[in-house]
Image (cartoon, rainbow, N blue to C red):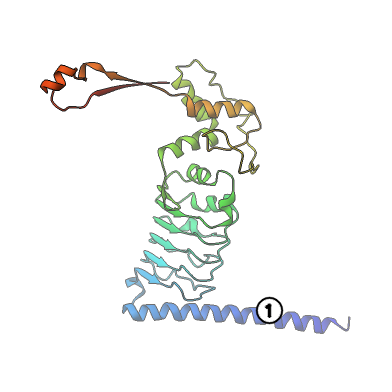
Amino acid sequence: MAWAPDHLARAFRHSTRIVSVLETALEISLRAVEDQLKICGHKRDADVFELFLSQKELTEVIDLSRFKKLKYLWLHHNKLHGVTFLTRNYCLTELYLNNNAIFEIEGLHSLPSLHILLLHHNELTDIDATVKELKGMLNLKSLSLYQNPLCQYNLYRLYIIYHLPGVELLDRNQVTEKERRSMITIFNHKKAHIVQSIAFRGKVDASWNPRSPFKQKPAQRIPPDFSFANNVDKTVFDDPEDAVFVRSMKRSAMAITSLNWDTVPTREEKYLDEKGTESAQMLTITLR
């Protein structure tokens, strides 16, 4: 019991030190904000539409809710760990948070107007929590998450496209129609069954049992030297029928190409140049 006062004293000094560090970080942030306001000549918070706070060595940021009309915010290349300082910035459309140490983005769901969000080069690990936070952003069109630990997940890109269908540019690459079709095949088995039934005019079993969900092993890896011919999809399935189904969706189209010989000039016509220099016509028929 004699050591209890010393123990409490050490704990108090430690907590005091943490509070002091936090206050110092917030003071640095406040000074950076005030400097930007002076540079831009803003005298009222209502006049602030953009803030440049990049490369300031910031570990914390003051609450920015006072800037009600803030639309553009640059915070890249700092040392931030979270984004709790963004609470009521409903007009924010572009947010640059890349090259920090952010491990969670709790609070971003309160930014309904966000159009561009850069989060690459951070420490995000929980892909489900990240997607959950971004789902409510109906205006989000451009998103970057590369160079985060969560990018190591199997089918990471298709998973993001499936849960955030409004995103058009992901990790600096345009989202393609092929990726959207693959996303439906893998993550929405019921819809894929319906599409397949329509494609084959009801000649396949398109029944759907919700008690038998489409399963796949979430993170099973295949050796890099192992290949499936020209198929780049190395997803491993529990049920072989699922693998056959996915393959049928990708390879069920057949194209027949024929040359229209009526448009090909004979040797005499070539010599006389009666049909001009038009190229021969090709006829292509695609069957599914």
Between 8 and 212, the residue placed more toward the observer is 212
Q: In percent of the image, x 47 and y 76: which residue is there? A: 56
Position of 23 relative to 272 (above/below): below
Q: Residue at x 64, y 44 (%)?
A: 219
In the rendering, at what x and y percent does residue 220 appear?
65, 42
Is 10 situated above or below 190?
below
Could you tell me which residue is drawn at 54 percent across and 73 percent down?
A: 59
Front in this rendered view, residue 268 or 287: 268
Quarter of image, res 20? bottom right
* Vertical comparison of 70 with 185: above or below: below
Task: Identify the image quadrant of residue 259.
Answer: top left
Q: Is residue 55 left or right of residue 245?
A: left
Task: Tell me residue 221's x, y (percent).
Answer: 64, 43
Residue 261 relative to residue 229: left or right: left
* Quarter the C terminus occupies: top left
Q: Position of residue 222 (x, y in %)?
A: 64, 41
User: Circle 1 sits in a helix, a strand or a loop, which is it?
Assistant: helix
Q: Which sits in the foreground, 287 or 211?
A: 287
Figure check: 63 above or below 273: below
In this figure, which residue is indicated by the disc labeled 1?
15
Residue occupying the point 58% across, 53% down: 150
Whether residue 220 sits left or right of residue 250 in the image: it is right
Q: Position of residue 162 (x, y in %)?
A: 49, 42
Q: Amino acid at mark 1?
A: Ser
